Image: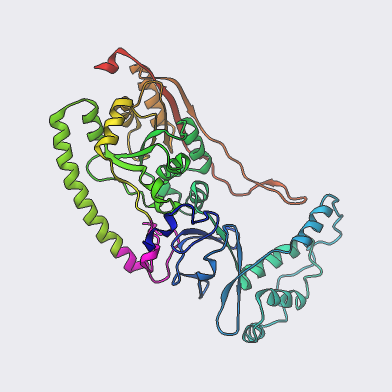
Amino acid sequence: MSENKPESGPTVNPRVTWEGCSVLLDINDGDRLVFARLSAGSTLKIGNKTFSLQPLIGCPFGSLFQVESGKEKPYLSRFIPPTEENNVQDEGGCQLQVESRDNRAIIDNNQAQSLTGDDIDAMRRQGATGNEIVEALIANSATFDKKTQFSQEKYRLKKQKKYAPRVLLRRPFSRSICEAYFKKYPARIGFLRVDALSLLLSMANVTANSDVLVLDMVGGLVTGAVAERLGGSGSVCNTYLGGTPYPMEIIRMFNFNNEICKRVLRCSVNYLCAVQNETTEQVSQHEDVCTMESQSDEKTSLSVSTEEVHLSSKNGVSDLVPENELSTTGKTCKAPKAGEKAPKEAIQSWKENGFSSLIIAAPEQDAWLLVKDLLPLLTYSAPFAIYHQYLQPLATCMHNLQLEKMAIGLQLSEPWLREYQVLPSRTHPCMQMSGSGGYILSGTRAYSNTSQS
């Protein structure tokens, strides 16, 4: 019963962390992003030091922590920014001050700092905090007062990241997870940008009580985003080609409860098509094959998960590892399992009523071949959306859909996103941005005489 505490619903506040939940740790304002599973034994390594994550349990998402030296060992302490000073600065920021200083006379010869490394180590042994070390460095800098205000802020921020790192406790949901993967390892999610993901859900009209058919080959990100939007209503059918389901380990990071997890089901494309075509012999054969495959998959997943726990249970942290399996140091950290085999009742309901929408995110597959098999599984007038990193596969698919008269309202879109830096006298587009977020083909399934054949 202790394993089901996070899934009990009313007794758990989703805005506050609990033991066993997944979190996204933002270190030094995006310099490093880490997924972790909180437990009493979970640790986080920053630089050459290791910190316990136990102080993060029971804190609201959005909390900020700072590394403190301590006399015995370093630890993470709750950090509350001085709001009064920030308000004063914001009120006075409307009036731009004329900067009379510049940095042209400053020579970077590593001689401006009189505080040595031994002095800093001595301060740490005496229990000096990171902020005190930063202030000492500023006081012993011969060129700090000569710098411009912008340069002083950069210098202070640089030293703060080194001697007093800060950790932001973020809640893992579709946007934060997508942004983290797109920033570090975009290839693992098919270069799916967050604006493309939101457009994908919107074009497919994913709403409450929907039955959504998803072909997800981007690690389970799309499946998790759909399940998150459904909120425990409707169903998500994660389908796959062949006999082996696609991995969707990312869905474990969403902190879904049992009510949402049981709405995420799996069924192969071949089985869905066989049921739709009412070929009883093929259905019975597929049932036998699916039963054997599910048993083998359970054995395989059990061995793989056990191996990954042994490999990564040292610190309970996953710094976006390829498998993205969150380490668990105890039984209380086990996450609810999503993606069970679809029961016959659900499959029969999908056959009678059809799916209400379709989402395809399979960069490695031919979009037209997938749509040709999956589109007949939808009810008439149901929307669909297909994501691909490149334009040409979707253009070919769009052309074939027009020739076959299978869909109407076809639209090929390219999402566009530009991030801005907003600072006094320094508001401009960010210097480094992604060139493209992929392409999305959307439309509506149409009725035709050939649909009944």
- Above or below, 303 against 353 in this view is below
Q: Position of residue 427 (x, y in %)?
A: 72, 47
Q: Is residue 340 left or right of residue 99?
A: left
Q: Is residue 271 left or right of residue 42?
A: left
Q: Position of residue 379 (x, y in %)?
A: 35, 24
Res 280 quadrant in image: top left
Residue 112 showing in the rendered view: no
Q: Position of residue 400 (x, y in %)?
A: 35, 22
Res 310 quadrant in image: bottom left
Q: Of 1 and 226, which appears nearest the observer?
A: 1
- Magenta residue check for 318: yes
Task: Locate the C terminus by quadrant.
Answer: top left
Q: Of 238 and 209, which appears nearest the observer?
A: 209
Magenta segment range? 307-335
Q: Of 180 and 262, which appears nearest the observer?
A: 262
Res 393 quadrant in image: top left
Main SS category, magenta section = loop
- Magenta residue check for 15: no
Colour treatment of the image? rainbow
Residue visible at 56% across and 75% down?
Answer: 75
Q: Residue furthest top?
A: 449
Residue 74 showing in the rendered view: yes
Q: Position of residue 125 (x, y in %)?
A: 62, 86
Q: Is residue 223 left or right of residue 178?
A: left
Give the number of callouts: 0
Q: Is residue 171 left or right of residue 116?
A: left
Task: Locate the N terminus by quadrant.
Answer: bottom left
